Image (cartoon, rainbow, N blue to C red):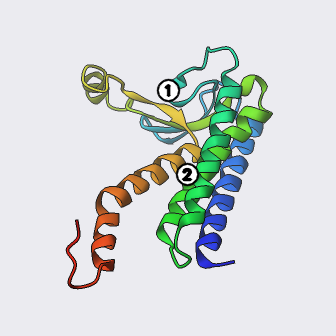
Amino acid sequence: MNAKWIWFSIVAFVGLVLDQVTKAWIRANIEYRDVGIEVIDGYFDIVHAQNPGAALGILGTVPGARYIFVIFTIVAAVVIFNMQRQLKSGEKFLPVVLGLILSGALGNAVDRIINEGGRVTDFLRVHTSGNPALETWLANHWPYMSEYPSFNVADIALVVGVLLFIIHYLFLEEKEDAEAKPAGEKAG
């Protein structure tokens, strides 16, 4: 197995395991919709939430949403594996990025398959109730919310992976392509 597959596999596996272990701990130790554990008073809590939809609960009330999300994950996994397969054997950055995206997608898909109602366990709660002035200001300005929707390790892996993927293709790939061209050719 070459470096690109090692990096990809390690990141995807560790991300998926970390996501599932943390969610299992939350389900076993914190009551659903309980106050939870204050980590930073008024700003960050560990809670037990269940999300039937995608980000922000999107499509949560659509009949069969669980199956739509699982099918979407299967398609995404096929695309990710195809992209991974096409990378150069010594590549390290993109395999890590693709491993993050895959671990996030699979982590939430596992929840949809094993949890009643296809719900995803979320537990990280970021809010501003500790600062009433900031809470009011955020509630009245874009994005018009003073509490971010609860999220989990899979969500973090997905967001970080997608952001790194975008950064790579917007800023790094063109530079790498230009450096790879012979000295007499122009990049373009």
Q: Which label sits on residue 8?
A: none
Q: Secondary structure at mark 1?
A: helix
| Camera-side residue of 117 and 173 | 173
Could you say where residue 156 lies in the image, as x and y percent from the top left?
52, 47
Disc 1 target residue: 56
Could you say where residue 59 lies in the image, as x and y percent from the top left?
57, 20
> Is 1 above or below relative to 163?
below
Could you say where residue 53 lies in the image, as x and y percent from the top left?
59, 25
- Amino acid under label 2? Ile
How busy is the neighbourhood of tag 2: few (under 14 within 10 Å), some, or many (20 plus)? many
State the CA–CA distance, disc 2 to disc 1: 18 Å
> How many numbered marks, from 0 up?
2
- Can I make out residue 37 in this image? no
- Amino acid under label 1? Leu
Task: State the image quarter where residue 9 is shown.
Answer: bottom right
Tell which tag, 2 or 1, sits nearer the viewer. Answer: 2
| Camera-side residue of 81 and 155 | 81
Q: Residue at x 43, y 55 (%)?
A: 165
Could you say where residue 115 lies in the image, as x and y percent from the top left?
77, 31
Q: Residue at x 64, y 70 (%)?
A: 5
Instruction: Tell me the quarter of the image containing the C terminus.
Output: bottom left
Q: Is residue 161 left or right of residue 174?
A: right
Q: Residue at x 47, y 46 (%)?
A: 159
Q: Which label sits on residue 101?
A: 2
Q: Is residue 13 left or right of residue 152?
A: right
> Is 50 above or below relative to 178?
above
